[in-house]
Amino acid sequence: MGIRQDTTKKGTTVTNKYQKNTRKTSTRPGLAVPDAVTIAMGEIADDMREGLLALAVGAGLQVMGSLMEADVAAACGPRGKHDPERTAVRHGSERGSVTLGGRRVGVDRPRMRATGGGGEVPVPAYELFSSSEILGRMAMGKMLGGLSSRRYRVGLEPVGEKVERAASATSKSAVSRRFVAMTETALAELLAAPLGQLDLVALMIDGVHFGQHLCVVALGIGIDGTKHPLGLVEGSTENTTVVTDLLTDLRERGLDTTRPILVGIDGGKALHAGIVAVFDHPVIQRCQAHKCRNVADKLPDDLAKTVTKKMRAAYHAPTAIIAEAQLEALARELEHTHPGAAGSLREGLAETLTVLRLGVPPTLMGVTGPTA
């Protein structure tokens, strides 16, 4: 907006004049936007000492007031003049609140009623600025970034002492409620998102602990390397029904299960059975890290470190044939003294070498394989 400094009046005033009689333009349905607004710098002069952001907040609140008045003028006509085309009449004002910098800040909002004795008419600008959705997104973003609800206020931008004193909705309980609401919404959107447009080359499935709960999570990897959260279900990776239900849901949401796809799993029998039941041509890669841990759990600590080192070296062999020979030789060394470890090593051995057999470059092993 074109702003000039008016030096003819006492004090500092930034003025941008507009014709109130002209119908306002709009950038969205129902929202009237004046061509220009007037900002009284004297009212926000104290904010200058608190920094540019606080000054901008003070100016923004004045602009918001002008936008709300423009909405009222668009519906009710110019103040003090009869407008035969008006659709509403002014109905005073009341206290309300808007979202500002992760807070709720009190403002005076104008009210309108429909002509002919109708009900309340919303003010589009107020409806826009008072939406609490942005608070929920901010709370979720900050908490996912490691900021607890107890310290939420510390992470907010400075908006000036005057605005800060009037702010609300930053208590631990309020932030927690918004976080819960937004995560529920995000989860519902995730579990309903269509998957038909995804071009996946790999799928990773595993059980993830959330507090006292265990969820089976499916993560897809696209042809461009992008990772796509696909879905989750509460249950165990040892439950074939749970796994099958998860994968069937992915198919019903449009995921192509007819093409060959690399699937990384931890070795659970239920995961294996569910994948084979739903996908026509799965190429299964057993997690090498899980296999190392499973074998090590059956050995004394000192021997476990040596065996784990040999297994990792085999997994980095130039070819799958060499790796399989090295792992089989290691199993023969263990079978007389630690038969349980030898059996664990041989179980599903071929599927731990799938990425080697496919010739996946080492730079992609951490992306497409389950060894990361």
Image: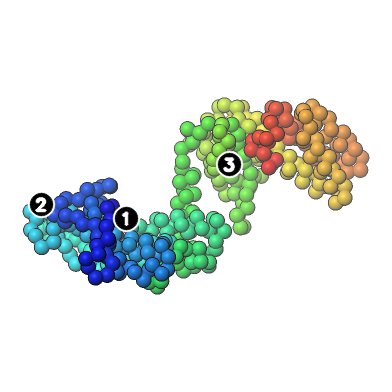
- Whether residue 264 can be seen here: no
User: Where's residue 161, x and y in %?
Assistant: 41, 71
Disc nearer the start of the sequence (2/1): 2
**Dot 2 amino acid type:** Glu
Disc nearer the start of the sequence (3/1): 1
Disc nearer the start of the sequence (3/2): 2
User: Where's residue 363, x and y in %?
Assistant: 68, 35
Kindly state the secondary structure of the residue where label 2 is placed.
Answer: loop
Q: Residue at x 25, y 68 (%)?
A: 94
User: Where's residue 249, x and y in %?
Assistant: 52, 39
Kindly state the secondary structure of the residue where label 3 is placed.
Answer: strand
Asked which quadrant contains residue 274, the reply is: top right
Classify 10 Å Cα crowding around label 3: few (below 14), some (14-19), many (20 and above).
many
- For residue 128, which numbered disc appears in the image? 1
Classify 10 Å Cα crowding around label 1: few (below 14), some (14-19), many (20 and above).
few
Left or right: where does residue 236 sit relative to residue 69?
A: right
